[in-house]
Image (tube, rainbow, N blue to C red):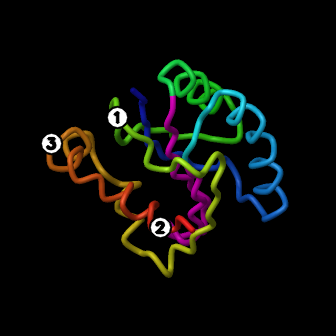
Amino acid sequence: MYFYRIFISKAQHSLPQDELTQLLNQSKTLIEEQDITGVLACVQGAFGTHDETHFIQVLEGPKPAVDLISDTITHDGRYGALRVLSEAPVENRRFDNWHTAFECINLEEHKELKAFFQLDDDVLQSNEFQEANPLLDFLSSFEQ
C-alpha cells in the first residue's frame, strides 16, 4: 500500500531556469533515498497582472516518506502558499518510473491550469474532484 499527495505552491520570487535546475538536483537525493516517485511541474506565466512561478507536485510512496518530503518542502523558504489538493492511500504508484520527473509548463499553452491555483476548499474536498483527479491525468500525460 502506498500513499500519494498532490499539492500546489508558489515561488517566493521568480525562478530562472538555472535556479529551477538547482532546486530539482537538491531534492533528487532525498526523494530517491525515501523511495518516492512522482512529478514536479513548474508553471510559469501571468497570474493576474504579473508573471509568477507556481508548482504542482505529486509525491507517492510510503506515507511516512511522503510526510517527510512534504514537511521539508513546507519549511523551505523558497515556497509559499502551499496547499494540499488531494491525498489518499493507493494500491499502485501512478508514476512508478519517475523518481524526480520535472516539467516546465507555460501557462499560455495550458490556461486551464490557472484554475487549480484558485480552487476553494469546498471544491477541493468534493467527492467529484477527489475521484476524478483531473490534475493527475494531466501530469500523467507527460510520462515518456
Magenta highlight range: 39-61
Name the residue: 47% across, 67% down: 48
Amino acid carrying mark 1 in the image: Val
Secondary structure found at label 2: loop
Amino acid carrying mark 2 in the image: Gly
In the picture shown, does residue 31 fall above or below 64? Answer: below
Q: In which quarter of the image is the C terminus?
A: bottom right
Determine crowd level at label 2: few under 14, some 14-19, many 20+ residues with C-alpha closer than 10 A.
Answer: few
Q: Which mark is residue 32?
A: none
Q: How far apart are marks 2 and 3 (CA)?
A: 29 Å
Q: How far apart are marks 1 and 2 (CA)?
A: 36 Å
According to the image, label 2 marks what residue? 48
Determine crowd level at label 3: few under 14, some 14-19, many 20+ residues with C-alpha closer than 10 A.
Answer: few
Report the residue that reaches farthest toward the bottom. Answer: 109
- Label 2 or label 3, whichever lies nearer to me, is 3
From the viewer's perspective, tell me whether residue 143 is left or right of residue 14. left
Q: Marks 3 and 1: in contact by CB < 8 Å?
A: no
* Position of residue 130 measured from the top left corner of the image (x, y, whole percent): 24, 44
* Position of residue 73 measured from the top left corner of the image (x, y, whole percent): 63, 33
In the picture shown, does residue 79 fall above or below 48? Answer: above
* Position of residue 20 measured from the top left corner of the image (x, y, whole percent): 76, 56
According to the image, label 1 marks what residue? 90
Q: State the predominant SS element of the stretch in magenta.
A: strand
Q: Which of marks 1 and 2 is nearer the N terminus?
A: 2
Q: Which of 133 and 17 is in front in this view?
A: 133
Secondary structure found at label 3: helix
Amino acid carrying mark 3 in the image: Asn
Q: Earlier in the sequence, mark 1 or mark 3?
A: 1
According to the image, label 3 marks what residue? 127
From the viewer's perspective, tell me whether residue 78 is left or right of residue 41. right
* Position of residue 134 measured from the top left corner of the image (x, y, whole percent): 30, 59
Determine crowd level at label 1: few under 14, some 14-19, many 20+ residues with C-alpha closer than 10 A.
Answer: few
